[in-house]
Amino acid sequence: MSNLPIRSNPLRVLFLVTSMPVGGAETLLAGLVRGMDRKRFAPEIACLKELGPLGEELAAELPVHHGLLSHKWDLRILPRLWKLMRSRQIDAVVTVGAGDKMFWGRLAAKCAGVPVIVSALHSTGWPDSVGRLNRLLTRLTDAFVGVAGAHAEHLVTREGFPAEKVHTIFNGVDTARFQPGDKLCARQLLGLPAEAKVVAILAALRPEKNHELFLAGAADIFHQDPSARFLVIGDGPLRNKLEQLAQELGIAHVTHFLGSRGDVDRILPAVDILALTSHNEASPVSILEALSCAVPVVSANVGSVGETVVEGVTGRLFPAGDQQAFVNATLELLSHDSGRIQLGLNGRNRTILKWSLVAMVRGYESLIERIYRTKLGLKIAPQPSRISLDPT
């Protein structure tokens, strides 16, 4: 039996990230910490760098620490994290994503005697591949979390993590917030024609999201359907370059760069199709948000996307990088209103059943509590297989 003290008060859980901009993984984390049962858990967030917009928002609701890493090779990060974890009496550390936070977070947690050490991952490769140094700390880690069945399998077969340590907790979305709305009102909000066919992409403006393919495809779609309009939702280092590309392709007048938005749930009802053109993904939250709003998805068939964008059921898939296939699939859905609407309804129903925010929160709560009780030597009920390839 462990000599760890038994907590009579909520377990203190520290989630470690780089920053909290408005992005998919950060939105998921915000929903997770807000949804945790406060009688059993006291969540906190530590940002290695700046807070970011979501961090500033969450700081009004729970403890959020920041400014722990001043530069890439700042070795003082280890004693800073150690001190933070000890002073806050942290019971569980969850690193979110790969990179510095995954390495230093787990090492500091081990040094500080934190009982539970978990790494949650959200990608299947560049730019968030795990890397050799992070693999060296596998023995210090109690659990690795994949966000979909195929993603969990990737963590075992490609990243080399022990199968018994890999758990699947599916990404979840607030289906009460993200729901079908009044299309005409949503379009008026954005200044879009009521009769337009609207195709959107919701992703940070970073290289791996391949917005270049989206814009090139948008130009082809517009030439064949002049009623088409395009929304680019998100921000990032490539914004100026992508706005220039839209100009060069002759679609700047029908392409709206909306930047980062905190009201995506109000924008999606204006959309006919959500597109995803990424080089790699795990299980993007943008897909779940769209499906929850009954918006079908046309996506590159990468990562675990096929588990949510089911061909002919909730949307269409195309080979990654295949512009013509992207254009063809999008035009086909735009030209068949009844079929497109049915795909969206299918997506809404599946999201409610399989990918809710509540299910994701309960998954993390159960995992953390189970590991903590195991470390204390307390008996726990038998658990199902950790890796599941089917959300059902």
Image (cartoon, rainbow, N blue to C red):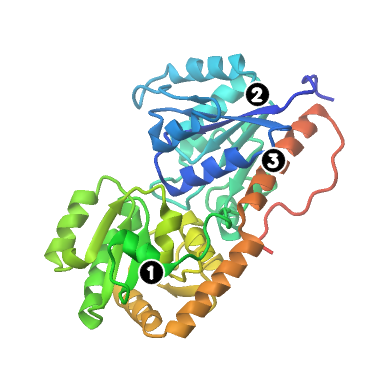
Q: Amino acid at mark 3?
A: Glu
Question: Can the viewer see residue 196 in this picture?
Answer: yes
Nearer to the camera, 284 or 51: 51
Nearer to the camera, 113 or 89: 89
What element does badge 2 sit on? loop
Marks 3 and 2, the one that precedes in the sequence: 2
Marks 3 and 1, the one that precedes in the sequence: 1
Q: In the visual, does 73 lie left or right of 173?
A: left
Give the label, 3 or 1, closer to the camera.
1
Q: Amino acid at mark 1?
A: Leu
Q: Are marks 1 and 2 in contact (CB under 8 Å)?
A: no
Compared to residue 337, the image places residue 145 above or below, namely above
The residues bearing labels 3 and 2 have C-alpha atoms spaced at a distance of 17 Å
Residue at position x 50%, y 15% from top?
79
What element does badge 3 sit on? helix
Q: Position of residue 202 (x, y in %)?
A: 38, 57
* Residue on which disc 1 sits: 184
The residues bearing labels 3 and 1 have C-alpha atoms spaced at a distance of 40 Å
- Neighbourhood count class around disc 1 (C-alpha, 10 Å): few under 14, some 14–19, many 20 upward: some
* Residue on which disc 3 sits: 365
Q: In the visual, does 95 lie left or right of 199?
A: right
Position of the C terminus by quadrant: bottom right
What element does badge 1 sit on? helix
Question: Can the viewer see residue 280 in this picture?
Answer: no
